[in-house]
Image (cartoon, rainbow, N blue to C red):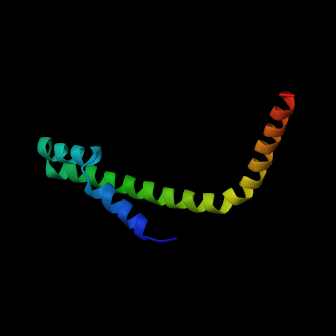
Amino acid sequence: MSLIPFILYCFIVTATPGPTNILILSAVQNYSIKAALRFTYGSVLAFGILLVSSAVLNTVFINILPNIIIYMQFFWHSIYVVSSLSDL
């Protein structure tokens, strides 16, 4: 797996002004820098957890889906056969 799309995704998500970045700017403007830093640390931690969980789930799906696809194909083909027999 290439890391270039992952790094590009991380850059785009962190560099563009999303709702979290706007909330951080608002917190700095309305509260102290110390309070805004706590919010920033929480946002960074949540983003890290999101990235790690996405990577783990992606790995799990890559390993599991090839085995499940065989059963899904059998299931959908059987539904197709049954539906085509009912049209007769």
Identify the residue at image location x=76%, y=54%: 70
Compared with 20, 57 (above or below) is below
Q: Is residue 8 above or below residue 33?
A: below
Q: Position of residue 59 (x, y in %)?
A: 58, 63
Residue 31, quarter of picture: top left
Extreme residue toward the top, this view: 87
Q: Residue at x 74, y 58 (%)?
A: 67
Q: Name the spot of residue 55 as percent of width and height, x first.
A: 51, 61
User: Residue 60 falls in which quadrant of the image?
Assistant: bottom right
Q: Is residue 59 left or right of residue 22?
A: right
Q: Which of 55/31 is in front?
A: 55
Q: Residue at x 55, y 59 (%)?
A: 58
Q: How many marks?
A: 0
Viewer-nearest residue: 34 or 20: 20
Question: Which quadrant is the C terminus positioned in?
Answer: top right
Provide residue 28's location: percent of width, then percent of height.
15, 47
